[in-house]
Image: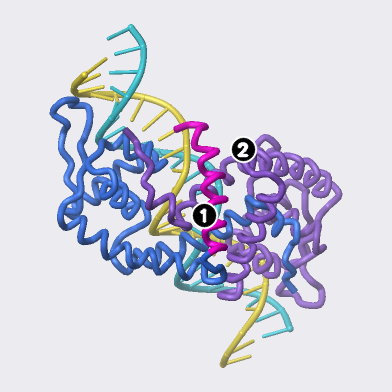
Chain colours: A purple, B blue, C yellow, D cyan
Amino acid sequence: MPNEPERLWQLPSWLLNRAGAHATRLVADALQAAGARRPHYTVLVALAEQGPASQADLGRALWMDRSDLHAVVSELEAGGLISRERDATDRRRNVVALTAAGRRRLAELDAAVVAAQDALLASLDRADREQLVALLTRVVRDHAGADR
Amino acid sequence: MPNEPERLWQLPSWLLNRAGAHATRLVADALQAAGARRPHYTVLVALAEQGPASQADLGRALWMDRSDLHAVVSELEAGGLISRERDATDRRRNVVALTAAGRRRLAELDAAVVAAQDALLASLDRADREQLVALLTRVVRDHAGADR
DNA sequence: CAGATGTCAGTAATACTGAAATTG
DNA sequence: CCAATTTCAGTACTACTGACATCT
């Protein structure tokens, strides 16, 4: 009979991984219905908020590897959701920007992702959710100083 | 300049994934120094707590796939940390149990994992940590009913 | 020359799928 | 016959590493 190992249920890293896997599944399923994956959505959100940016800046803002970001940006460009052009003032950089189609697609994805958050946190009321977000933010921000 | 997209920092699933990735890295590094990986530790903990169990029961208790569990159990057996024998009363099952060497190894790994938790939650005091564990437990437990 | 950027190839670890063989 | 268990082969996604060419 499968008992729940209490030591694991007291281990923050294990709980984070389990909840994270759960979240990943819910969000991925929601995005898949719209033909996108998690990193694609993340990049679109960042571009919508801070406007055009280089791939290196996006990587630092999103904690994504340059290499993975390159693949995602290429796919988004192929789908016409973003534009990618050489920066005239610094020709090492690509300037990545949302297109009108990208903005429309993001609106669709947003609805799906919001619904997934609700499913994920169904057992928590509004105050609990804010508590959780506040605590996680501190953990993530604390680590953010480590690399960049 | 990489700004932080506020919408992502308000998104529970994103925070969970980031904090989870952070936790995974810290724990994996700690375990690697002792020559183990995360699932190995998890299986050892479960066996130490609930005693001998079949692979199917371990999988359900730990939320691990049968297929992945098979690989982990094989590696632990090769290292002499667990024993694996056919169940005489139900010959479909393997009875997996800790060996003395496994118990010693677990004690070493425990120290490393506890240290990793401290590094992970460095920015939270004791009350905050308990709050976080309580909230995550509710999220995970809520989802637990979904499959098993 | 040192450093940043984008690109490319490849790897490790996790989560998962589908199927076969054995047993209850 | 149906269901559970173990085993096996293979896939998808994420995270990461190392290298290279280009540009500042």
Q: Crowdedness of circle 2 by 10 Å Cα count: few (<14), some, many (20+)?
A: some
User: At 49% across and 37% down in the image, what residue appears?
Assistant: B144
User: At 20% across and 44% down in the image, what residue appears?
Assistant: B97
Kindly identify which chain the residue marked by label 1 belongs to.
B
- Look at the image and tell me in which quarter the C terminus of chain A lies: bottom right
* Along the line of sight, the residue nearer the viewer: B94 or A94: B94
Q: Amino acid at mark 2?
A: Asp
- Look at the image and tell me in which quarter the N terminus of chain A lies: top left
Say which quarter of the image contains residue B132. bottom right
* Along the line of sight, the residue nearer the viewer: D21 or B60: B60
**Residue A81 placed where, x, y %?**
77, 49
**Residue C6 placed where, x, y %?**
67, 66
Location of residue C3 with respect to B24 vertically, above or below: below
Give me the C-alpha separation between circle 1 and circle 2: 26 Å
Which segment did they paint magenta? B127-148
Q: Residue furthest right?
A: A100
SS at mark 1 in the image: helix
- Mark 1 or 2: the one toward you: 1
User: At 57% across and 50% down in the image, what residue appears?
Assistant: B135
* Along the line of sight, the residue nearer the viewer: D19 or B56: B56
**B58 relative to A11 in the view: left or right:** left
Q: Amino acid at mark 1?
A: Val
Is residue B133 located in the magenta-colored stretch of the structure? Answer: yes
Is residue B64 located in the magenta-colored stretch of the structure? Answer: no
Q: Which residue is mark 2?
A: A29
Q: Which mark is residue A133?
A: none
